[in-house]
Image (cartoon, rainbow, N blue to C red):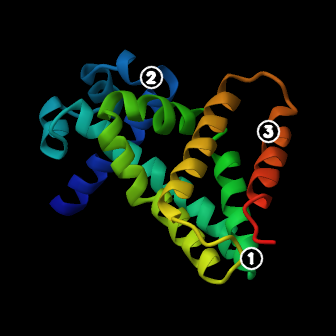
Amino acid sequence: MTRAQQRERTRETLLRVSRELFAAQGYGAVGLAEIVRAAEVTKGALYHHFEGKAALFRAVLEQVQEEVGERVADAADAREDPWERLTAGCQEFITAATAPEIQRIMLIDGPAVLGWNEWRGMDEASSARHLAEALTALAERGVITRQPVAPLAHLLSGAMNEAALWLAASGTPDDLADTRAALSRMLEALRAP
């Protein structure tokens, strides 16, 4: 194994182990000593790849956001109709965000650890940007009423994030189906007459 391969393997191990620990215990309960012990690396190796625990968490969050984004894109891309693409993507976000590790890392610890502005910037660079693009295309085609897209995208994104957080605390099995149905009704209200 080359040095470059070894460095990449160490980085991947740190990300995997940290993700497992952050998801199970939460960012605040996990120390660097626990991470390096579980990853079987030195603190020096960790600091070679990341400036510290917050930078490591940011990389884990980026990974989680990317995975959720891929799931949303796959669900949307499976549809031909632009309206169905939007609704399928939104529904997949709600479903993906019900996974406890996604909720903990992306929706609970993400804003708390990085701060609201940085977390929001990361969200806007990934899923929020795709949502705004989809809404813009639908407005241009007359599928939804022409309107400023930025406020609408923020409202929808916030509603879906809040629904995912609510689902995290919910213990009722029907809540996911009820939430998906409510989201469908909310999205349907956007359609142009």
- Mark positioned earlier in the residue sequence (1 or 2): 2
Spatial separation of the CA atoms under disc 3 and disc 1: 22 Å
Q: CA distance from mark 1 to mark 2?
A: 36 Å
Gap in angstroms between the C-alphas marked 2 and 3: 23 Å
Residue at image location 69% in from the left, 71% down from the top: 144
Is 139 rendered above or below residue 104? below
Residue 13 visible at all = no
Q: Residue 80: x and y, percent?
A: 74, 82
**Residue 176, label in figure:** 3
Q: Nearer the viewer, residue 182 or 172?
A: 182
Q: Closest to the observer: 4 or 115? A: 115
Which residue lies under the disc numbered 1? 79
Marks 3,1: beta carbons within 8 A: no
Q: Amino acid at mark 3?
A: Leu
Residue 119 at x, y percent in the picture? 36, 42
Write down the quadrant of residue 60 in the picture. Answer: top left
In the image as oriented, which residue stretches furthest toward the top? 29
Position of residue 132 in the picture relative to residue 174 (left or right): left
Would you say 140 lies left or right of 190 here? left
Q: Is residue 34 above or below residue 183?
A: above
Q: Position of residue 86 (x, y in %)?
A: 68, 67
Figure quadrant of the C terminus: bottom right
> Is label 2 in a helix, a strand or a loop?
loop
Q: Which mark is residue 183?
A: none
